[in-house]
Structures are given as C-alpha cells and as structure tokens.
Amino acid sequence: MKRTSIVWVLASACVAVVLAAIGVITASVLDRKQQDLQQGAEAYREERIRLAMWRLDTLAAAIVGEEDKRPAEEFDLPPILAPVDDKLQTLNPLYAGAPEHSNLYWVVNSNSSSVTTPQVYPDQVIMGNGVDPAFNAINEQNYERVSAILSNRLDMAIKGDLPFCDTNKDLSCQAVHLVLPKQVEQKSQLVKGAKEDFSLQNVKGKEKGEEVVKMVNKAEVQQKLSEVDTRKRRSALNRVSENYAWGPQANLSTQLNTNDQVTEVTQFRPIWLDGELMLVRKVVRQSGESVQGVWLNSKKIKQLLLDEVADLFPQASLIPVAQDLRAILSGEEIVQDPQTMLKLPYRLSPGERAEVSLSLIDLLKGPIGLAWAGTLLAIVAGFFMLRSVVQMSERRASFVSAVTHELRTPLTTFSLYTDMLSSGMVKDEEKKESYLETLRRESERLTHLVENVLAYSRIERGSARARIEEVGISSLMERMLGRLRERAGDEQMEVLLSVDPVSSKELVKLDITAVEQIVFNLVDNAVKYASGEDCGSEIRIHAVKSGENFRISVTDQGKGIPAKERKRLFNAFHKSAEEAAVTKPGVGLGLALCRRLAQAMGGNLLLEKGREGEGATFVLTLPQKK
C-alpha cells in the first residue's frame, strides 16, 4: 500500500472515531434532554391538575355549601289555609328560587317512609296561587323518577340485600346510605398528615439550579406533592364546611308545626343512586328523623365545573366515581386519587397527555449544534489541509525526482564535453564549435529551470513584488520578439507576431519582466511539445487591448493537449520522474508559474477550449486601469 493511501486510511479512521464519539454524546444528550422535557411536561401537567382540583373543589364546595345553608324548613310543603278555599299562604321558596343545576328537592320521612317534595303541588291548588303548570309538570316527572329510585332502595333494605342494614327499618338503612352515622362528628375533624417540607431549603449537596429542577420534576416527587395537596384540600374544605354547619335558625312562616323544633342537621353528602347524583342529609326533629335530598342535574353540574378549568384543560372531562358503600357506611378512611374531587364524586380526566418530543433539529440549535458545526468544520478544514499537505508532499517528491532527472542530463553533458575539450581530444574545429553550442544550450536550459524554480519559490513565500511600468504595446512585443525567435529557432520553428492595429500605439501598465517570462514559457512549451513531423512550424502571438483588458494569446500548431491533462496542467510539479524521462524535458512548473505571475498582476492565464489535435491556445489577460 502506498504511503499516501496509508495516510488517508488513518485519517478516515480518526474521523470515524470522532464522529462516532460525538454521535454517542449527541444521542446521550438527546435522551437526557428528552427525559428532562418529559419530566418537566409531566410536572407542569401535575401542577395544572392540582390547580384545577382546587378550582373544582372550591366551586363544588360552594354548590354543596349553599345547600348546607338551606334551612331544613324549606323542604316542608306550605300549608293550605282551608280545604274549601284551596289557597296557599305562600309559595315555597324552592319552587321558584331553586338553582338551575338542581332537578328536584325531596324528603323521606321516617314515620311513613314516603317520598315528598316541596316543588310539586296538587292540581286543585295550581290555579290562582301563582303555580306554573308547565314547571309543575316537569317537577312531577322528576318526582316520579326520584320516588322510583328511592322505593327500589327501600325494598332492598327491607329484604336485607343492602350491607349494614338491620331489619328494624332504621332510616339510615331504608334510604340506603342517605344517612351516615358518623358524619356529624367527622365534619369538624381536620385531616392531619405528616409535616412535609418541599422548599428548596432542604436540598443539600446540590446547587439550586438545574439539578433542583430535575429533582422536583421527578415523577415520585410530583406524586408526593399531589398526595399532600389532596390532604391540604380536604383540610381546607373541612374548614370551609364548618361555615355552612347547621345552627339555630328562625322559624319560617311556612313551618307546619312551630313546636316541631329541628335539633340536628348533618351536612349534605353526595351519592350516586341509579346513575343520578344526589345530595343527602339527615334532619332530626322532635317528631322524628327525615332524610332531605337534592337531585342534582349532573349534566349542568359537569358543565359548570368544566368551564371552571377550561383555560387549563380545554379537552377535559369528568368521570363519575363509583362509591364504596361498605367503606362509606363503616366510616373507613377512603384513599382517593389526587384527580378525584372531594366534594362531588367525579374524577378529572385532563384530556391531554404530558408527551413532548425533542427533535434532533431542536437539539442542534444549542451547544450540541455548535459542537457538530465545529467538528464538521474541523473535519473539512483538516481534509483540505491534509490533502494540501499530501499533494505538496507528492509534488515535492515529483519535483525532486524530475529535477534530478533534468539536472542529470545537462551535468553529464557538461562533464563529458568539458573533459574532451580540456584534454585536447577534439581536434576538429567544427566539432569544437558544435560541442560549445551544445554546452551553451544546456546552460540556458539549466538557467531557465533555475529561474522558474526561484521565481515560483518567491511567489510561494510572498516575497515577489510586481514592478509596474507603463510601456507601449508595440514596444513591449518587439522587445521580447528576439529572444522568442531565438528559442523557436532551436527547433526550426517560427514565431509570428501580430498586434491589433488599433491597439498598437496604446500604453499598458504591467510588470514587463513578468510578462516576458510568461510569454517565453508559453513559447518554450510550444517549442517542446508542438514541434516535430506531425506538427506545424509556426507559433502565433497576438496582442490586443480591449476595453480595460490587455490580452496576449500564444497559439501553436501541435497535437493539442489531451482532456485528461487539462485538469492538472496548471499544477506545480505535476510531472514525475518517469513522465519526465519519456516526455520532453521539464519538471511541470512553467505553466503553474505563469498563472501565479498573472494572478499576482491581477490577471489570469487560461487554456482556450479547442479540439484535440488542432493545437493549443493560451491566453494571458491583464486588467488595465485608467
């Protein structure tokens, strides 16, 4: 394997290792960022859920609390003055003033186990008492529905099909779980949990920054926060409920019996009966016990609650929560889901998932992107630098081998001919002159080679300085014509010079020495490569000034330049020792030098496109400023 191939293989392996390493790092960072974002999204979702639950329970507490404040006497039917008159003293406040989210108010009396409602009046008192027949009909339908539900439960209680029910027809059993034995005692108990500290003061060994955010965003921390939040909500709602607790109330004019004092009233408790949401409480009077209930319009209740959290969860829904009758009647502590309301048996379904995705493009916009950009730029820069170094190394090796070959022939000639001439071995004068002419040509050849190498070296070091002079075009071309014709004459070729008649007297500003060297190199190449039996003997040089450009073209009548050679024609030292041995003398430096000299003057040297086998035309273009 060549040395160059080994270098590229090793470089490719290094690039692969670097890319693999940064790829692994990127994947790791992407995964970590994804986890952080996911935790953050889940934490943000949990925080909004907690806020939503506070809103829902606050609104529910207000709804239930308003019913708790309602006097027990409002559930009684207003008395009729006289059976003959069929007149009411006044309409029950619940008849016209019931909230929209309540379907019906009802009562189960312990004495008769019958269901009554203050919102349905007999037909004989509807007319002339301000009772709306249509509204009364709706209430009557609702009353029939409630009666059917409660009657079914009463039958189940009598048969003993309900848990915790005795056969003594106790009201708490007859109305199923309408009456909770321990509710009055429990209402004043505040939920107390272990003291929790979620402040940042208890974070030790970590900076209060990104690490703290990651810790707080963890699922187990959020779950703990939600559990504590549920206990705090329960405590707060219990304190609020105390403000709605029953107390001494003024007797209402609608009371049936002023001596039938109310001695005990529990808070309303929500329950599900046959899929209907009810609020129930126990009322104890001197005459006995009763159960007062409110059949809530679950559809309107849910809409009120969802409107309260629509800004947090637009797609939220409320799911009814099945109640554990055994736990309720036994007074066991019920562990509730943090998303379950405390005042109404609903569970909040946010309707959205805490799912986020971090795309690779988003990640690349940050430090990782800068790292990738820097790495790729470094790889690209390293590629071009390595290629430049390898090419330079190859060119130097080719130059050394080519120069060695180029120097060996003239030095051998010098050594042989000088020995023969100095030793007197050559007696014939014509041979002496021939040998001396050969030595002169070899000397010029070496001089030309050395000049090109030195000039190229000065350009590479940046020490070459153009000496701009003003000269006429005709004068410039005539000045270099003699040397060009002498070089062409070595191979029996002829230089034909033409100057545009319009431009012949024009002045141009340029580095005369550099232009002469460029044109001489072009003619020298034409002499080397465009001479022979299959080639013409003319080298045409044409000079013209067009606008702000001065152009000199050199055209030969050779075989042209093959397409595969055109790409590396202007590369320095593009000839190897083998190529120098089988082709014309030279190290492949002349055209590279000519182009660099032209570019140093702000111009360029190009090879015109032409057909292979029809000669070659090089054009030197130099800009001119007025």
Image (tube, grey):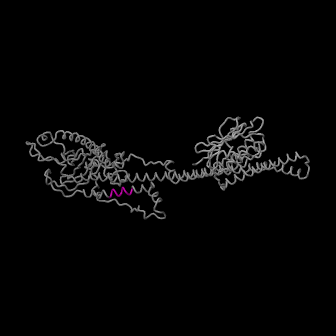
Q: Position of residue 356 (x, y in %)?
A: 45, 48
Residue 228: say if magenta: yes
Q: Is residue 314 visible?
A: yes
Which region is colored magenta? 227-235
In the image, 26 versus 237, the foreground residue is 26
The residue located at (90%, 46%) in the rendering is 428
Q: Most extreme residue toward the left, as rendered?
A: 84
Above or below: residue 196 compared with residue 535 = below
Q: Position of residue 253 (x, y in %)?
A: 13, 52
Q: Position of residue 611 (x, y in %)?
A: 67, 35
Determine which quarter of the picture holds residue 481.
top right
Above or below: residue 517 compared with residue 243 = above
In the image, 134 versus 20, the foreground residue is 20
Determine which quarter of the picture holds residue 220.
bottom left
In the image, 134 versus 80, the foreground residue is 134
Q: Position of residue 412 (x, y in %)?
A: 84, 49
* Magenta highlight: main SS: helix
The residue located at (43%, 65%) in the rendering is 201
